[in-house]
C-alpha cells in the first residue's frame, strides 16, 4: 500500500481536471492504496514572497496558513499527483502557489512517484507544453523522483465535459489503479 496525495489545482469543483483526479483516486483506492485529494483552491495559501523566513526558522514559513499541513503531506506521500487546468498555456495560479511555497522544506521532498493530469479547451498538440514544463521543473528539484504517467485532457472546455470522454476518464482510472 502506498500513500497517494492528489493536488487538484482546479478552481472549479467538479471541473474537468478535478473529475479526472476523482477517477484517478477511485482507481488508486481500488488498488489498495491510501489516497487523499486536496483541492488547493479550498485551502488558504498565500503566495511565496521570497523573504526566506523559512531558511532561518527550520522550514517554518512567515505565513501561518494551510500550507504547512499541505507541505507535510507532500513530504510524507509516496505518490504525488499534480493536476491543473491549462490557463494561458501554463498551470493555474492555485497549484503554482503550492509549488512555490514548497521552498520552505523542498529538500525534504524525496523519492516520489509523480503523475500529471492536465486539461485544456484547445486540442493542439503543444497546448500543454508550458504546463508540463512547470510540472517537470518541480520534479527536477525532488531527489529520487520518477515520472510515472501523464494524462493529456485536451479539447475539454465546459465544466464536466470530460465525462463525455470515456477514454480520458478511463486513462485516469487506470493510472491510479496501476499504483502498487
Image (cartoon, rainbow, N blue to C red):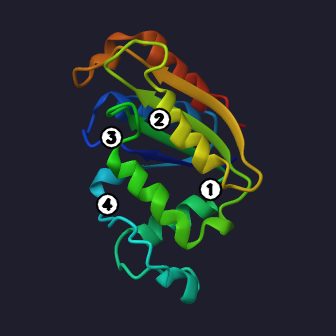
118 displayed left or right of 156: right
| Residues at marks 2 and 1, CA–CA distance in whole angstroms | 22 Å
- Front: mark 4 or 1: 4
163 displayed left or right of 79: left
Helix, strand, or loop for circle 3? loop
Give the numbered dot on residue 77. Answer: 1
Which residue is identified by label 2?
A: 131
Which residue is identified by label 3?
A: 10
Residue 112 point in image, percent of width and height = 69, 50
Give the numbered dot on residue 43. Answer: 4
| Residues at marks 3 and 4, CA–CA distance in whole angstroms | 12 Å
**Which numbered disc flags the more N-terminal residue, 2 or 4?**
4
| Residues at marks 3 and 1, CA–CA distance in whole angstroms | 21 Å
**Which numbered disc flags the more N-terminal residue, 4 or 1?**
4
Q: Quadrant of the C terminus?
A: top right
- Front: mark 2 or 4: 2
Q: Nearer the viewer, residue 31 or 150?
A: 150
Amino acid at each position: 500500500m502506498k500513500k497517494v496525495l492528489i493536488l487538484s489545482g482546479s478552481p472549479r469543483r467538479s471541473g474537468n481536471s478535478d473529475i479526472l483526479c476523482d477517477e484517478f483516486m477511485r482507481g488508486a483506492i481500488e488498488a489498495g492504496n491510501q489516497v487523499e485529494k486536496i483541492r488547493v483552491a479550498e485551502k488558504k495559501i498565500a503566495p511565496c514572497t521570497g523573504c526566506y523566513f523559512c531558511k532561518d526558522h527550520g522550514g517554518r514559513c512567515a505565513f501561518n496558513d494551510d500550507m504547512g499541513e499541505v507541505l507535510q503531506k507532500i513530504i510524507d506521500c509516496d505518490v504525488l499527483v499534480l493536476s491543473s487546468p491549462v490557463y494561458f498555456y501554463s498551470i493555474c495560479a492555485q497549484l503554482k502557489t503550492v509549488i512555490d511555497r514548497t521552498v520552505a522544506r523542498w529538500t525534504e521532498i524525496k523519492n516520489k512517484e509523480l503523475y500529471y493530469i492536465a486539461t485544456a479547451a484547445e486540442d493542439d498538440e503543444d497546448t500543454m507544453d508550458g504546463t508540463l514544463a512547470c510540472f517537470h521543473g518541480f520534479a527536477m528539484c525532488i531527489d529520487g523522483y520518477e515520472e510515472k504517467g501523464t494524462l493529456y485532457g485536451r479539447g475539454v472546455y465546459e465544466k464536466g465535459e470530460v465525462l463525455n470522454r470515456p477514454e480520458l476518464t478511463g486513462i485516469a482510472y487506470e493510472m491510479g489503479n496501476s499504483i502498487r
